[in-house]
Image: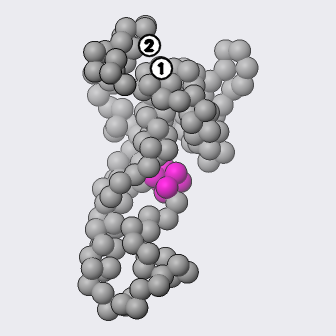
Protein backbone atom coordinates (compact mmCIF):
# COMPACT_ATOMS: atom_id res chain seq x y z
CA UNK A 1 0.00 0.00 0.00
CA UNK A 2 1.17 3.48 -0.74
CA UNK A 3 -0.69 6.52 0.46
CA UNK A 4 -0.59 9.82 -1.37
CA UNK A 5 1.48 12.76 -0.22
CA UNK A 6 -1.84 14.55 0.36
CA UNK A 7 -2.80 12.00 3.03
CA UNK A 8 0.67 12.16 4.58
CA UNK A 9 0.44 15.98 4.80
CA UNK A 10 -3.08 15.79 6.25
CA UNK A 11 -1.90 13.41 8.98
CA UNK A 12 1.13 15.59 9.72
CA UNK A 13 -1.10 18.67 9.98
CA UNK A 14 -3.47 16.88 12.35
CA UNK A 15 -0.58 15.53 14.41
CA UNK A 16 0.85 19.04 14.83
CA UNK A 17 -2.59 20.30 15.85
CA UNK A 18 -2.78 17.51 18.44
CA UNK A 19 0.65 18.44 19.78
CA UNK A 20 -0.29 22.10 20.07
CA UNK A 21 -3.85 21.53 21.33
CA UNK A 22 -5.74 23.61 22.35
CA UNK A 23 -3.65 26.37 20.77
CA UNK A 24 -4.10 27.41 17.15
CA UNK A 25 -1.61 26.12 14.58
CA UNK A 26 -0.85 28.31 11.60
CA UNK A 27 -0.55 26.89 8.11
CA UNK A 28 2.91 28.44 8.02
CA UNK A 29 3.86 26.38 11.10
CA UNK A 30 3.07 23.16 9.21
CA UNK A 31 4.93 24.44 6.16
CA UNK A 32 8.03 25.32 8.20
CA UNK A 33 8.11 22.20 10.38
CA UNK A 34 7.61 19.74 7.54
CA UNK A 35 9.11 21.67 4.62
CA UNK A 36 5.91 21.51 2.59
CA UNK A 37 4.33 23.79 0.00
CA UNK A 38 1.88 26.30 1.47
CA UNK A 39 -0.87 25.88 -1.17
CA UNK A 40 -1.05 22.15 -0.39
CA UNK A 41 -1.46 22.76 3.32
CA UNK A 42 -4.10 25.46 2.75
CA UNK A 43 -6.11 22.99 0.66
CA UNK A 44 -5.68 20.20 3.20
CA UNK A 45 -6.67 22.35 6.18
CA UNK A 46 -9.74 23.51 4.25
CA UNK A 47 -10.78 19.90 3.56
CA UNK A 48 -10.12 18.87 7.17
CA UNK A 49 -12.27 21.81 8.26
CA UNK A 50 -15.08 20.84 5.88
CA UNK A 51 -14.96 17.32 7.34
CA UNK A 52 -15.26 18.65 10.89
CA UNK A 53 -11.82 17.47 11.98
CA UNK A 54 -10.42 20.95 12.54
CA UNK A 55 -11.91 24.33 13.19
CA UNK A 56 -10.35 27.21 11.35
CA UNK A 57 -9.99 30.87 12.16
CA UNK A 58 -9.21 33.29 9.34
CA UNK A 59 -7.20 36.47 9.39
CA UNK A 60 -4.42 37.83 11.49
CA UNK A 61 -3.87 35.59 14.47
CA UNK A 62 -5.82 32.85 12.75
CA UNK A 63 -5.02 29.22 12.25
CA UNK A 64 -6.60 25.88 12.94
CA UNK A 65 -7.09 23.50 15.87
CA UNK A 66 -8.69 20.14 16.40
CA UNK A 67 -12.48 20.33 16.33
CA UNK A 68 -12.79 17.39 18.70
CA UNK A 69 -10.51 15.47 21.05
CA UNK A 70 -7.58 13.68 19.42
CA UNK A 71 -8.81 10.43 21.01
CA UNK A 72 -11.91 10.63 18.80
CA UNK A 73 -10.07 11.11 15.50
CA UNK A 74 -9.37 7.73 13.90
CA UNK A 75 -6.44 7.60 11.48
CA UNK A 76 -8.30 5.14 9.21
CA UNK A 77 -11.14 7.64 8.80
CA UNK A 78 -8.70 10.40 7.87
CA UNK A 79 -7.19 8.10 5.25
CA UNK A 80 -10.62 7.30 3.81
CA UNK A 81 -11.37 11.03 3.66
CA UNK A 82 -8.16 11.97 1.87
CA UNK A 83 -7.68 8.86 -0.28
CA UNK A 84 -11.24 7.94 -1.16
CA UNK A 85 -11.80 4.30 -2.12
CA UNK A 86 -8.66 2.20 -1.80
CA UNK A 87 -8.93 0.46 -5.14
CA UNK A 88 -5.56 -1.30 -5.08
CA UNK A 89 -6.40 -3.06 -8.34
CA UNK A 90 -9.05 -2.28 -10.94
CA UNK A 91 -11.24 -5.24 -10.01
CA UNK A 92 -11.97 -3.59 -6.65
CA UNK A 93 -14.10 -1.09 -8.57
CA UNK A 94 -16.90 -2.90 -10.43
CA UNK A 95 -17.63 0.19 -12.56
CA UNK A 96 -14.09 0.26 -13.99
CA UNK A 97 -13.24 -3.43 -13.99
CA UNK A 98 -12.18 -4.96 -17.30
CA UNK A 99 -10.66 -8.14 -15.88
CA UNK A 100 -12.38 -11.34 -17.02
CA UNK A 101 -11.21 -13.16 -13.88
CA UNK A 102 -13.43 -11.24 -11.46
CA UNK A 103 -14.96 -13.54 -8.88
CA UNK A 104 -12.51 -16.40 -9.41
CA UNK A 105 -9.15 -14.66 -9.03
CA UNK A 106 -7.31 -15.63 -5.87
CA UNK A 107 -4.95 -12.66 -6.23
CA UNK A 108 -7.88 -10.26 -6.09
CA UNK A 109 -9.19 -11.94 -2.94
CA UNK A 110 -5.75 -11.82 -1.30
CA UNK A 111 -5.31 -8.13 -2.16
CA UNK A 112 -8.77 -7.41 -0.78
CA UNK A 113 -7.89 -9.16 2.49
CA UNK A 114 -4.57 -7.32 2.66
CA UNK A 115 -6.29 -3.97 2.17
CA UNK A 116 -8.82 -4.80 4.90
CA UNK A 117 -6.00 -5.79 7.27
CA UNK A 118 -4.10 -2.59 6.46
CA UNK A 119 -7.15 -0.46 7.22
CA UNK A 120 -8.00 -2.48 10.35
CA UNK A 121 -4.66 -1.46 11.89
CA UNK A 122 -5.29 2.19 11.01
CA UNK A 123 -8.87 1.99 12.27
CA UNK A 124 -7.42 0.98 15.63
CA UNK A 125 -5.13 4.03 15.74
CA UNK A 126 -6.14 7.49 16.91
CA UNK A 127 -4.60 10.88 16.47
CA UNK A 128 -3.92 10.89 20.21
CA UNK A 129 -1.78 7.78 19.81
CA UNK A 130 0.33 9.22 16.98
CA UNK A 131 0.93 12.30 19.12
CA UNK A 132 1.45 10.43 22.40
CA UNK A 133 5.23 10.87 22.42
CA UNK A 134 4.63 14.61 22.62
CA UNK A 135 7.88 15.61 24.33
CA UNK A 136 10.02 13.76 21.78
CA UNK A 137 8.07 15.17 18.85
CA UNK A 138 8.14 18.71 20.20
CA UNK A 139 11.87 18.54 20.93
CA UNK A 140 12.43 17.61 17.29
CA UNK A 141 10.20 20.32 15.80
CA UNK A 142 10.93 23.21 18.19
CA UNK A 143 14.35 23.96 16.63
CA UNK A 144 12.71 24.00 13.19
CA UNK A 145 10.01 26.39 14.38
CA UNK A 146 12.73 28.62 15.78
CA UNK A 147 14.50 28.69 12.43
CA UNK A 148 17.22 26.13 13.09
CA UNK A 149 17.54 23.79 10.11
CA UNK A 150 18.39 20.13 10.74
CA UNK A 151 21.34 18.93 8.59
CA UNK A 152 19.15 16.32 6.86
CA UNK A 153 16.70 19.04 5.77
CA UNK A 154 19.31 21.24 4.07
CA UNK A 155 19.70 18.86 1.15
CA UNK A 156 16.03 19.09 0.15
156 shown above or below 123: above
Residue matched to label 2: 145
Mark 2 and mark 1 lie on one chain; the one further toward the N terminus is: 1
Q: Is residue 113 visible?
A: yes
Q: Where is residue 124? Give x, y as percent.
A: 34, 53
Secondary structure beneath label 2: helix
Q: Is residue 79 magenta?
A: yes
Q: Is residue 126 magenta?
A: no
Report the quarter where the N terminus lies.
bottom left
Q: Are marks 2 and 1 in contact (CB under 8 Å)?
A: yes
* Local crowd size for mark 1, using a 10 Å CA cut-off: few (<14), some (14–19), many (≥20): some
Quadrant that contains the C terminus: top left
Q: Nearer the viewer, mark 2 or mark 1?
A: 1
Q: Residue at x 53, y 78 (%)?
A: 96
Magenta span = 77-83
The residue that appears at 71% across and 15% down in the rendered structure is 60
Quadrant in the picture for residue 26: top right
Q: Nearer the viewer, residue 37 or 137?
A: 37
Q: How many other residues sit within 10 Å of disc 2, few (<14), some (14-19) or many (≥20)?
A: some
Q: Residue at x 62, y 24 (%)?
A: 63
Dot 1: what SS?
A: helix
User: To which quarter of the image does residue 89 belong?
Assistant: bottom left
Vertical placement of 24 versus 128: above or below? above
What's the CA distance linking mark 2 and mark 1? 7 Å
The numbered disc on residue 61 is none
Q: Nearer the viewer, residue 155 or 29?
A: 155
Amino acid sequence: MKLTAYTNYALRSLQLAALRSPELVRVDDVVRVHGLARPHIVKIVHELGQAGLVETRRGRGGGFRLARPAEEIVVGNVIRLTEGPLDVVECFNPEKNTCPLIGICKLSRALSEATKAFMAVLDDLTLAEIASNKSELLSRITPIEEGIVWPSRRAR
